[in-house]
Image: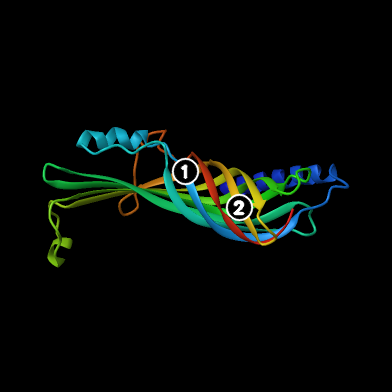
Amino acid sequence: MVKKFFFVLIVALIFVNITRAQESESVGVISKFGAAGGFSPVWIMPNFDPINEQIKKIGLPEFNNSGMMTYGGSGYIYVMFWNNFRIGGMGFGGKKSVSKVVNGFNNQVDYSIGAGGLTMEYTLPFIHKIAVSVGCILGGGSVEIDFYKNKTDYNWEDVWQSGENQHKKITNSFYTITPTLNIDIPLNRFIAARFGGGYLVEIDGDWKADNDRNISNIPNKLSANSFFIEAGVFVGFFAF
């Protein structure tokens, strides 16, 4: 835990020093300022290959590696004593499923992913009328994979007894330092369109099965590392 904290802290300090150096070279450039927040649909592209290798063995359709839709929100405020630097937060999450009846059993696999944390961004001062910001998300996230195999509906007694119905769950909790690039285009002083993206980086993932049991032999490709893109509408005050 201590190593994780210091790793995140070091990256944050490096980012701070870089932006301060850039700021000192931008004397005479008008600083951007404002604050905003809004709803952000996020399209994320995990690598489903390790899961597909397993589920096709039991006759389930494969997950499409083109990606999945998640939903969340984000916001920021410019730090007035530090030109063109803003801090805020972002979070998103979603689920994708495949299912099929195989040999009389209803089989279903759910893949859920979510992440979020503190955002730190530097808005390029030499670009006018829009805000182009480079930065990162410092936080954490999780992946959950659920496998269901059901033949009948439940009654109260069935829930407490082993039978034909099955449910397996594996989870992965991790820290992340996610580089981002965002573009905010103001439609007026109070509404802006947001386009952006980044690369979710998993740090020190911890896989568990069912009731927090350890799980071994996790494929190297089964991680939260993935590109994502977002688009949305922000409401606030903009002076770009």
User: Of marks 1 and 2, which one's residue comes earlier in the chain?
Assistant: 1
Q: As rendered, which of 143 and 237 lies closer to the eye?
A: 237
**Callout 2: few (<14), some (14-19), or many (20+) C-alpha neighbours within 10 Å?**
some
Where residue 193 is drawn, which disc sits there?
2
Q: As rendered, which of 54 and 106 lies closer to the eye?
A: 106
Residue highlighted by disc 1: 44
Identify the residue at horizontal 52%, vertical 48% (top origin).
175
Identify the residue at horizontal 30%, vertical 37% (top origin).
62
Q: Where is residue 6 in the image (x, y as percent from the top left)?
A: 62, 48
Give the structural element (helix, strand or loop) at label 1.
strand
Give the structural element (helix, strand or loop) at label 2.
strand
CB contact under 8 Å: marks 1 and 2:
no
**Callout 1: few (<14), some (14-19), or many (20+) C-alpha neighbours within 10 Å?**
many
Q: Please state the total of marks drawn on the protein image.
A: 2
Relative placement, left or right, of 101 versus 22 is left
- The quarter holding residue 77 reads bottom right
Identify the residue at horizontal 41%, vertical 37% (top origin).
66
